[in-house]
Image (tube, grey):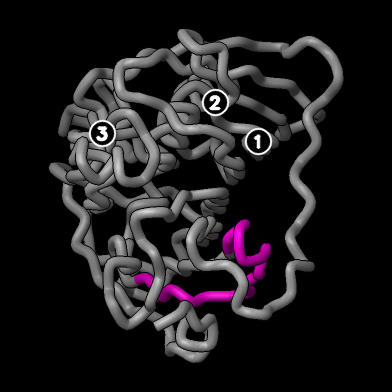
């Protein structure tokens, strides 16, 4: 059966409950390569701001046959995380995930699916809003509109103000997937080959988290409470073991643009980045 966007649009919000504890906070930090003690040691532990993208996460739902998508050809296109409160290191969270809009790029070009997850503490406090865009490379041509995609944040036409390079480990994807994204594309060489990659790739959100560490270091003195928002487009995959270099342009009080590239292949992997901080 072909992909039918109304299946997603008509769904009630997916409710996901997750218990957060220091172990999960430290595991996420290790999954994005952190070594700083405040993020990987229980004494004085703080959650990295980008951990919001994993909180109350419904998992890799696309393998469910009810959605009729070619899950092997899905790529993560964009992510935006807006933090309303500092992320907790312990407690229960509730996420509500909804879908839409859904854009049809054409039979040979795929579809774009937007999804939003509102994250709350069990006492009702609104913790974060996470918006993801997925590129369904094998599911276009269902007759929908291709209009309505937001314009990306512009990157200044000048030299960046900061450059920060961070390595990734050969087992980075295997570590990161333990935070909830079990897509076999990031672990199984056969699945990676079937999707057109020479070997398993790093999760887009792992790249996002590593770049988030660079922004946290360069703009906020490694103080997680100072990061308020982070948006990015994924332009190419990273292979575990590669070095990610983040370029940062300050754009006035509390705002900056950024991009990231893989040093070894000189390939842009995150583009049109935007961050708000205090």
Numbered disc 2: secondary structure = helix
Mark positioned earlier in the residue sequence (1 or 2): 2
| Looking at the image, residue 136 lies above or below residue 168 | below
For the question of whether residue 194 can be seen, the reply is: yes
The first of marks 3 and 1 along the sequence is 3
Query: Furthest residue to the right?
Result: 157
Mark 3 and mark 2 residues within 8 Å of each other at the beta carbon: no
Quarter holding the C terminus is top right
Asked whether residue 11 is drawn in magenta, I would say no
Residue 192 falls left or right of residue 126: left
Judging by the rendered image, the residue that carries numbered circle 1 is: 273
Instruction: Kindly report the distance in space between the C-alpha atoms of the residues bearing marks 1 and 2.
Output: 11 Å
Image quadrant occupied by the N terminus: bottom left
Query: Spatial distance from mark 3 to mark 2, Cα to Cα?
Result: 21 Å
| Of the two numbered discs 1 and 2 in the rendering, the one whose residue sits closer to the viewer | 1
Q: Where is residue 240 in the image (x, y as percent from the top left)?
A: 31, 23
Q: Give the range drawn in magenta.
A: 95-110
Residue 173's disc is 3
User: Which is closer to the viewer, label 3 or label 1?
Assistant: 3
Quick one: label 3, few (<14), some, or many (20+) residues within 10 Å?
many
Q: Are marks 3 and 1 in contact (CB under 8 Å)?
A: no
Instruction: Note whether 157 is above or below 152 in the view shown.
Output: above
Tag 3 secondary structure: helix
Horizontal placement of 30 versus 154: left or right? left
Query: Which residue has dot 2 on it?
Result: 215
């Amino acid at each position: 059966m072909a992909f039918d966007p109304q299946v997603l649009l008509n769904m009630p919000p997916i409710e996901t409950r997750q218990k957060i504890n220091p172990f999960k906070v430290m595991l996420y930090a290790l999954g994005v390569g952190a070594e700083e003690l405040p993020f990987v040691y229980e004494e004085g532990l703080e959650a990295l701001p980008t951990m919001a993208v994993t909180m109350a996460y419904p998992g890799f739902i696309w393998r469910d046959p009810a959605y009729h998508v070619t899950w092997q050809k899905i790529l993560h296109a964009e992510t935006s995380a807006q933090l309303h409160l500092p992320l907790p290191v312990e407690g229960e969270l509730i996420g509500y995930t909804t879908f839409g809009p859904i854009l049809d790029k054409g039979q040979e070009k795929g579809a774009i699916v937007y999804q939003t997850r509102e994250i709350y503490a069990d006492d009702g406090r609104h913790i974060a809003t996470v918006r993801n865009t997925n590129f369904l490379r094998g599911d276009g041509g269902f007759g929908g509109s291709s209009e309505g995609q937001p314009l990306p944040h512009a990157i200044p036409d000048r030299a960046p103000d900061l450059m920060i390079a961070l390595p990734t480990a050969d087992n980075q994807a295997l570590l990161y997937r333990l935070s909830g994204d079990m897509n076999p594309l990031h672990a199984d060489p056969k699945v990676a080959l079937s999707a057109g990659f020479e070997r398993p790739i790093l999760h887009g959100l792992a790249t996002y988290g590593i770049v988030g560490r660079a922004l946290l270091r360069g703009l906020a003195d490694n103080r997680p409470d100072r990061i308020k928002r982070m948006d990015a487009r994924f332009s190419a995959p990273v292979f575990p073991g590669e070095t990610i270099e983040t370029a940062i342009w300050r754009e006035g009080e509390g705002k900056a643009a950024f991009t990231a590239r893989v040093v070894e292949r000189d390939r842009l992997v995150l583009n049109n980045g935007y961050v708000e901080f205090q």
